[in-house]
Amino acid sequence: MSKKPRKIKRKSNTTAKSRPPLSPQQNARLQQAFQAQTAGNLAFAESAWRALIAEKVRLPQVFLNLGIICAQTGRPEESQNLCKRALAIDPRFPEARMHLATAYDQLGKTEQAVSAYQRLLADQPGMFVARYLLANLLKNQGNIEEATAHYRNIMAQQPGYAQAHFAYSGVHRYESADDPHIISMLDHYQQGNLAQDNRILISFALAKAFEDVRDFRRAFDYLKTGNELRYRKYHYTIDSDRDLFDNIIKTFTADAMAGLDVRGEASNRPIFIVGMPRSGTSLVEKILASHSDVFGAGELDYLYSLGVSKFFSESAHFQFRPLDTYSKDLYESLGREYLAKIKRLNDRADRITDKLPFNFMMIGLIKIALPNARIIHCVRDARDTCLSIYKQNFATDNYRFAFDLKTAGQFHNIYRKLMEHWHRVMPGEIYDIRYESLTRNPEDEIRKLLAACELEWQDACMDFHKSEGKVTTASFYQVRQPMYTSSVQLWEQYREFLGPLLEELGA
């Protein structure tokens, strides 16, 4: 997964003569806001930017930087409006044009986003960050050929831009270890002054390249390097996640859930697709989203975020209290607010899929607040799942367990224990679909999947790889291919290197 673009602090082209001078206090606040945003203190920076706007400061970079914060904190519509305000002051401000295109993308306005990026690059062809973002958008839309051309353009103009090398490796199929791009990446990798983040990206890219040419030993060597560099950032242990999962199991008992006097939302619009990351959730969503009655919304953090904000607290160590200590309205508002959020995404489709894998932790809340929602659980061989996780350079901090074989196995074990619990306390409420069965017998498994979602058969679901739609996860390439089985039991190719993982899973 690609890294987020850097925060932009560049000043606009507006001349000092065209705006009122800042007071010393405003200048000081401006510098404090820049420093806070650079340091990641977004709350302070946002407060400072808003204070400057309230004082009638009309610098385009003030609106832009506030817009960037809004984009980073899940407010793309506000980000869009702020970028437009920056451009009303300086219509040629390139960074504001770039972030406006990004806001369009976040809002699902794909055509507007592509057009905005293209107009910007026509004026500023050397703006490689914008070209990279456009390439990612095209890739996610399935326009692999055009995306590839943009990645190559960036690598030719900015050979040190590791993000482009990493992204290109994901869309390129390597036939030989003599591939010019492998040679180029090895040259970069061997540079003594290569920044750590760039070394991580090149490591994962080389691992993918050497797997393509079936040199699994070299592939694993680079995988190990990239993962070890990432793992050092977190010092992750399983303890806190194990405590949380145990808390969920103890809290969401059959008796505790049955004892609640809650009237959940009756809607059956949501279809939650859950499971371990890399277990086939993207494939299942693409199949369902190929149905004319279904809108594929991708990985939404709506339900998970609502659950955490409403039911967790610092005083309870960010775990669940006994279910009967929460108000009836809290449960019911969870369902109402979630349905309102997905309605804003699409108000026409009968069903909407939400494929955030970690919603498996919230299945109890889902069945209380949205009792008619469908829950599809993707199951895959634990060894293939954990290896596939280990092969991904995830862009967020939500996958801290992923960068070490031992902790990946430990996390899979507690996930499996939690899913067994859900099946015990709510039998028949969760439909398991096995990745291996789906890839070997697609028509039979797709028919059963559609029946579990109360959807009629449509041939389009068999041709899921031909359907349009945005895919932003690491599976963007796989779900645009016909069904294949080459990734089943891939772990066997790496067996000799997977000792810590196999030991945990065996235990």
Image (cartoon, rainbow, N blue to C red):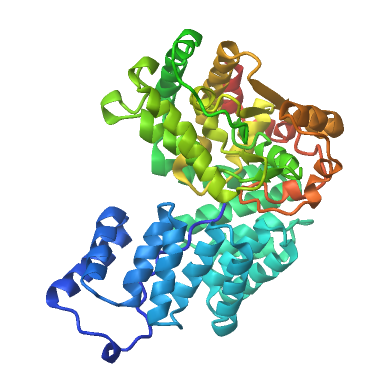
The residue drawn where x is 77% and y is 27% is 451
Residue nearest the observer in this picture, 159 or 187 = 159
Report the residue that reaches farthest toward the top.
255
Q: Is residue 351 left or right of residue 252?
A: right
Q: Quadrant of residue 284?
A: top right
In the depicted structure, whether residue 179 falls above or below residue 97? above
Report the residue that reaches farthest toward the left.
24
Q: Quadrant of residue 47?
A: bottom left
In the depicted structure, whether residue 193 falls above or below residue 426? below
Residue nearest the observer in this picture, 325 or 432 = 325
The residue drawn where x is 56% and y is 24% is 371
The residue drawn where x is 68% and y is 50% is 476
- Residue 257 point in image, percent of width and height: 47, 14
**Visible in this render: residue 261?**
yes
The residue drawn where x is 39% and y is 58% is 70
Looking at the figure, which quarter contains the C terminus? top right
